[in-house]
Amino acid sequence: METDEALDLLPAKYVADDQRGMRCDGERCSALSGRIGEGTSCLVYEVRPDVCRACLPGDPECRMARAAFGIV
Ligand code: SF4
């Protein structure tokens, strides 16, 4: 269970104004650094939300997201 204390560790500049998720730049999480399809990293990796921890490289959700953006 994700606690408020854990979520409070996220820098406010990456959190949506309504506090319901990460701030996005268009369809892209503002904490995502780099170029999609070439090399990316999470700027808040150590304190990323549980929903991010649940998605693993190559799992069904990952493959679905990659397909949605045309990344094979
Ligand atoms: S892991 Fe989560 S917080 Fe990090 S860049 Fe991806 S969506 Fe954003």
Image (tube, rainbow, N blue to C red):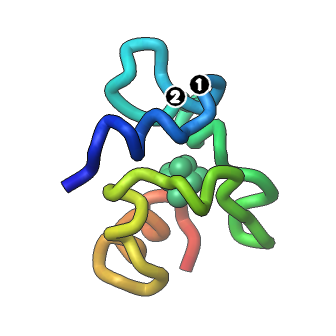
Image disc number at residue 12: 1
Q: CA distance from mark 2 to mark 1?
A: 5 Å
Q: Name the image quarter holding residue 53.
A: bottom left
Whether residue 25 appears in this view of the structure is: no
Front-most of 38 and 12? 12
**Height in image: 2 above or below 36?**
above
Badge 1 marks a residue whose secondary structure is helix
Q: Name the image quarter holding residue 51.
A: bottom left
**Height in image: 55 above or below 13?**
below
Where is residue 24? Give x, y as percent: 55, 31
Residue at 35% from the left image edge and 83% from the top image edge: 59
Front-most of 17 and 72? 17
Image disc number at residue 21: none
Where is residue 64? Give x, y as percent: 35, 69
Q: Which residue is mark 2?
A: 15
Q: Residues within 10 Å of mark 2 (few under 14, many from 20)?
A: some
Q: Give the amino acid at mark 1.
A: Ala
